[in-house]
Each structure stands twice: as C-alpha cells, then as structure tokens.
Amino acid sequence: MRPLLSWAGWRAVLARTYSPGPSAGYRGASGAQGYVRNPPVGKCDLQGELDRFGGISVRLARLDALDRLDAAAFQKGLQAAVQQWRSEGRTAVWLHIPILQSRFIAPAASLGFCFHHAESDSSTLTLWLGEGPSRLPGYASHQVGVAGAVFDESTRKILVIQDRNKLKNMWKFPGGLSEPGEDIGDTAVREVFEETGIKSEFRSLLSIRQQHTNPGAFGKSDMYIICRLKPYSFTIKFCQHECLRCEWMDLNDLAKTENTTPITSRVARLLLYGYREGFDKIDLTVEELPAVHTGLFYKLYHKELPDNYKTMKGID
Ligand SMILES: NC(=O)C1=CN([C@@H]2O[C@H](COP(=O)(O)OP(=O)(O)OC[C@H]3O[C@@H](n4cnc5c(N)ncnc54)[C@H](O)[C@@H]3O)[C@@H](O)[C@H]2O)C=CC1
Ligand SMILES: [Mg+2]
C-alpha cells in the first residue's frame, strides 16, 4: 500500500494557488471567471483558480493523490490553506468535492464550510472569507413547471387532463417540469405530447405563477408558466401513468366549471377573452436575441412591439 500523503505535503499542495494570467479563458461552475491551467505540482496537481471576485476555487477531483489522503490530513491542510488565503485577502473559497470523496465534507464543515449546492456526482461547499456577511450568490431558487393550453380556434376546444396522482381530480392543462437547458415553449410542447399524444406548436406565453415553499418543489419556490399552443394533431392517446382522463373541452365550459384549479380557470377566461377580442391582447410573444457579453443567445418574451418601435425609425 502506498503511504498517505503527509500533512506537510498536503499543506504545500493546497496552499499553492494561482493568479489569472493573460491567457485566462475558462469559466468554472462556481462562477470562476479567470483561470490558468497550471503546470503539474508534484504528484498532486491542484487546480486552484482565482475568480474575478477574489475567491478561490478548489476542485478536489484534480488532485492526483486524492485516494491516498485521509480526512484528518485533509482537515489540517485545508485549515492551513484557509489561513493563507485569508492572509492573502481572498474573499471566499469554493470547494468542489466528488461524491466518492465525500469523506472530506465533514472536515471542511468543521472549518466553517457550508453546502452551496450538489449535483448528481459532486457537492460544492463554500466559505466566506471577506468582510461582513457573505456576498456569495445562492444556488437555484426555483423549479420551473410549464403547461400547454392547447387551443383549437376552429372548434373552440381546449385540451385538458385530470391528474392520476392527485387526491382531488380537477381539470387542468397538461404540463410538467422543464429539463435543464430546455426552452419554455419546448417544455410545453414536449409535456403535452408525452401526456396526451397531441402534437402542437408554441404560440405565446400567457401567464406566470410564482409560489414559495412549494412542497412539490422540495420546499423551494415554484414557477409555473402556461403557454398557448396550437394543435396540429387531434387524436388523444394519453399517458396512463400520469393522467386519469383527457379530453377536448369547449373553452366556455372550462371557463365556467368549478371542477378545475383557480389558475386553470383564470387562464381559460384569459383565453376566451383573447379568442373574442384578439390574441394580441393576451399574448407574450418570443424573440431570440444575442447576449452582449457571452455571445450566447436568449429568448425574450413580451407583448408584441410594432416594427417602427423595434427599429426606432420615425419615432421622435
Ligand atoms: N395549478 C395547476 O393546474 C397545477 C400546476 N402544477 C405545476 O406543474 C408543475 C409540475 O408538473 P407535474 O405534472 O407535477 O410534473 P411532471 O409532469 O414533470 O411529472 C409528474 C410525474 O412525475 C412523477 N413523480 C413526481 N414526483 C414523484 C415522486 N416523488 N416519486 C415518484 N414519481 C414522481 C410521477 O410519475 C408524476 O406523474 C409544477 O410547476 C407545478 O407547480 C402542478 C399541478 C397542478
Ligand atoms: Mg405533468
């Protein structure tokens, strides 16, 4: 068996942090902005990253000798490293721990580290070193659910389901949770298809509900967004796992029935208003725009803006 890495060796490794250089370019999950890939440091190649807010990001997965390190040696080394970072004026430490190295969580916690977030295969702990209370941003605060109000203008019918897993069965729109990285409209179309077999396309965003300490969101806040969709198939083949019933219902009936949730009732009435007075009265439409700093694109939802206002041509 190879010997465990000594405290002195671990301290030397951990205490070595790096400053961003001109070739910085990597953006870490912790929000790390500048980063330089460093030359290997002996057997333990610590990738210490300094972010643009003066915090240090330590990824234990990048340490060569991790398997040979015991929790007590880690704690001593981390304590010494924190002391050094503090003396260097660092603002915070982000500690990324692979799930199989979770034995390092308790020693870090005993030094004041707290959980910031966890993904399926790793956890991230933080320690604020700066002045006053922590200014580190929290992790995701909401779960996002999206439903599709699939409305067929030619028949005035709307697609509704009753959820199999609810104690009280009320009519509601098919929908479900958004996948990471999924556009709102795509979630609505996917969920509607999975739950009802109906194919549809996105038209607009109709409403957003925000609810805090939601039991279905693990006590976090829930954002529930309802989209207007246009159907292009009509034969229902509903999911037996999730739905008890599914049907095309007259929009007037849905707007008047008591056997529905308040949010479904309100959106049915909103749709009826849009159907009679023009959907432009109720629709938030979407446009893709480029992000200035990242070169990425995003979707912006708002009431339709006349072209002359988009270009500001002829507007004083
Ligand atoms: N006011 C309304 O009309 C309602 C709105 N919502 C909103 O819809 C969104 C969620 O939609 P859903 O249709 O519930 O999600 P979903 O369609 O993504 O998933 C629901 C399915 O996930 C599975 N599932 C969920 N929790 C589970 C657990 N703990 N164990 C095992 N299986 C589980 C079940 O198969 C369940 O049928 C949320 O944003 C929520 O607030 C949900 C219900 C009613
Ligand atoms: Mg669902």
Image (cartoon, grey):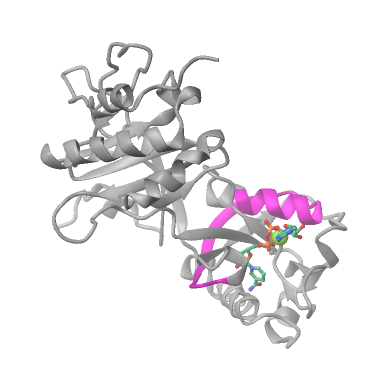
Q: Is residue 152 magenta?
A: no
The quarter of the picture where the C terminus appears is bottom left
Seen from the viewer's position, the closer of residues 236 and 58 is 58
Seen from the viewer's position, the closer of residues 77 and 37 is 77
Looking at the image, which residue is at 27% across and 23% down? 25
Q: Is residue 24 left or right of residue 63?
A: left
**In the image, residue 103 above or below residue 229:** above
- State whether residue 54 appears in this view: no
In percent of width and height, residue 137 lies at 31, 53
**In the image, residue 130 above or below residue 254:** above
Q: Is residue 190 magenta?
A: yes
Looking at the image, which residue is at 45% across and 49% down? 117
In percent of width and height, residue 242 lies at 80, 61
**In the image, residue 283 above or below residue 19:** below
Q: Is residue 245 left or right of residue 47?
A: right
The stretch of residues the image draws in magenta is 187-214
- State whether residue 70 appears in this view: yes
Which image quadrant shows ligand 1? bottom right
Seen from the viewer's position, the closer of residues 23 and 295 is 23
Q: Is residue 294 left or right of residue 151?
A: left
